[in-house]
């Protein structure tokens, strides 16, 4: 319907494609790894075994942006370009980068064996950058002193280590996940899931502290109520993450009926849905805490006061401590990805060139 014959090579079974591109319990719906970029993009409109993976992270970009934009219209909020919102924008960039890179990685990965590797390295890199975007938002909005400058924190040393620690853990995750594509293949899904548990535990430290310590807001105040609602969102965020791990490791439901969920309903699509719902609840949690800061009576008369409170809290967000941190992290992740991509070229380059000779032809001369 959307593709002419030349643009629509037939979909293949798991025995007709290189073992490298097959997924456990997925038996059909494969694209051969020699598509052009145009064929890859158009395949978003064909029922292949990657179509659902693309849409389950592409459509959420718009849902997330819709819920995010609400904050900027709040009555007591400073202008969107104010330093108060820098951490929220870095979080936004982290989430949108993750969703966009993930959806495009699933769409473009059949350009070649090497491009496939690079696509998934980028996917892991953006997941790690997202965890640091979360950490920055947590640090500036959920940190107890973001709410009340005099509130006790978690100790000067721990606070000083929090953001650098999150960046370090993010880099370890990229290294480990990229490595599972070249070594440690047997337990790759388990390793990838576990290494992303570590940044969750590190990044969530301010939330754990807030759950255990008394609220920094005056009881019965609007800020207290808004901040209290954040706990429920956090528990749901954790529940969605746990569900996503079950799908990713368990390969449910395709494990129960191999071949039946090849195109629609296989575990990776449910994994994407659960990770997005966890991000959405995380956004609601951050919004509840941002609202609590903005609703403080001392801050309400002036929009700029919110930024001042945050500044008093923890040295305040600056372009360097938010965008600068993200940029430095991205540059480091890019060099890690560059190194693994160079290795992938050495490992898969020859096979890619061999497969390129075996292009599908419309008259029925298929790859074999
Ligand atoms: Zn994915």
Image (cartoon, rainbow, N blue to C red):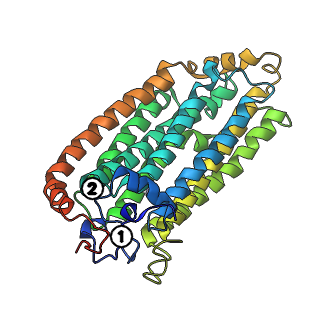
Residue lying farthest right?
Answer: 220
Q: For the residues carrying marks 2 and 1, which lies nearer the camera in this image?
A: 2
- Above or below, 297 relative to 54: above
Element carrying mark 1: loop
Element carrying mark 2: loop
The residue wearing badge 2 is 112
| Ligand 1 rendered quadrant | bottom left
The residue wearing badge 1 is 23
Residue lying farthest bottom?
Answer: 257
Comparing 274 with 246, the one in front is: 274
Q: Quadrant of the C terminus?
A: bottom left
Return the x and y of residue 331 as percentages of the image width and height. Answer: 34, 31
Can residue 289 be seen here? The reply is no
Please give the name of the residue rendered at 63% of the width and 25% of the height, measured from the top-left corner: 85
Comparing 309 with 158, the one in front is: 309
Mark found first going from the N terminus, 2 or 1: 1
Can residue 24 be seen here? The reply is yes
- Above or below, 8 relative to 293: below
Report crowding for label 1: few under 14, some 14 to 19, many 20 or more residues within 10 A (C-alpha): some
On whether ligand 1 comes within 8 Å of the CB at mark 2, the answer is no
Please give the name of the residue rendered at 34% of the width and 77% of the height, measured from the top-left corner: 13
Comparing 269 with 6, the one in front is: 6
Q: Is residue 40 left or right of residue 82?
A: left
- Above or below, 365 relative to 357: below
Residue lying farthest front?
Answer: 363
Q: Is residue 43 left or right of residue 213?
A: left
Return the x and y of residue 101 as percentages of the image width and height. Answer: 44, 46
Return the x and y of residue 192 as percentages of the image width and height. Answer: 37, 57
Return the x and y of residue 211 as percentages of the image width and height. Answer: 65, 45
On whether ligand 1 comes within 8 Å of the CB at mark 1, the answer is no
Q: Is residue 11 left or right of residue 95?
A: left
């Amino acid at each position: 319907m959307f593709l002419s014959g030349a643009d629509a090579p037939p979909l293949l079974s798991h025995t007709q494609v290189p073992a490298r591109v097959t997924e456990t319990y997925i038996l059909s719906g494969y694209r051969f790894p020699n598509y052009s970029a145009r064929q890859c993009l158009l395949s978003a409109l064909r029922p292949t075994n990657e179509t659902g993976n693309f849409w389950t992270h592409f459509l959420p970009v718009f849902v997330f942006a819709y819920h995010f934009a609400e904050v900027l219209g709040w009555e007591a909020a400073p202008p969107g370009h104010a330093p108060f919102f820098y951490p929220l924008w870095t979080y936004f960039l982290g989430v949108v980068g993750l969703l966009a890179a993930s959806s495009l990685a699933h769409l473009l990965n059949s350009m070649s064996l090497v491009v496939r590797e690079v696509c998934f390295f980028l996917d892991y890199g953006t997941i790690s950058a997202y965890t640091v975007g979360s950490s920055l938002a947590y640090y500036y909005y959920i940190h107890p002193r973001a709410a009340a400058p005099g509130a006790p924190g978690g100790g000067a040393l721990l606070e000083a280590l929090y953001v650098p620690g999150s960046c370090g853990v993010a880099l370890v995750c990229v290294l480990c996940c990229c490595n599972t594509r070249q070594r440690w293949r047997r337990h790759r899904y388990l390793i990838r899931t576990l290494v992303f548990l570590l940044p969750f535990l590190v990044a969530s430290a301010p939330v754990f502290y807030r759950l255990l310590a008394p609220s920094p807001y005056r009881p019965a105040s609007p800020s207290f109520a808004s901040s209290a609602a954040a706990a429920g969102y956090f528990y749901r965020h954790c529940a969605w993450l746990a569900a996503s791990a079950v799908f990713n490791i368990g390969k449910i439901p395709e494990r129960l009926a191999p071949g039946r969920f090849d195109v629609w309903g296989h575990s990776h699509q449910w994994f994407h849905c659960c990770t997005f719902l966890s991000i959405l609840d995380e956004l609601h949690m951050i919004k509840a805490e941002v609202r609590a800061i903005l609703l403080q009576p001392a801050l309400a008369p002036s929009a700029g006061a919110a930024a001042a409170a945050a500044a008093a809290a923890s040295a305040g967000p600056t372009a360097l401590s938010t965008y600068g941190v993200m940029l430095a992290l991205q540059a480091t992740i890019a060099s890690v990805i560059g190194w693994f991509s160079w290795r992938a070229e050495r490992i898969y380059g020859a096979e890619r060139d061999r497969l390129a000779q075996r292009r599908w032809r419309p008259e029925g001369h298929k790859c074999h």
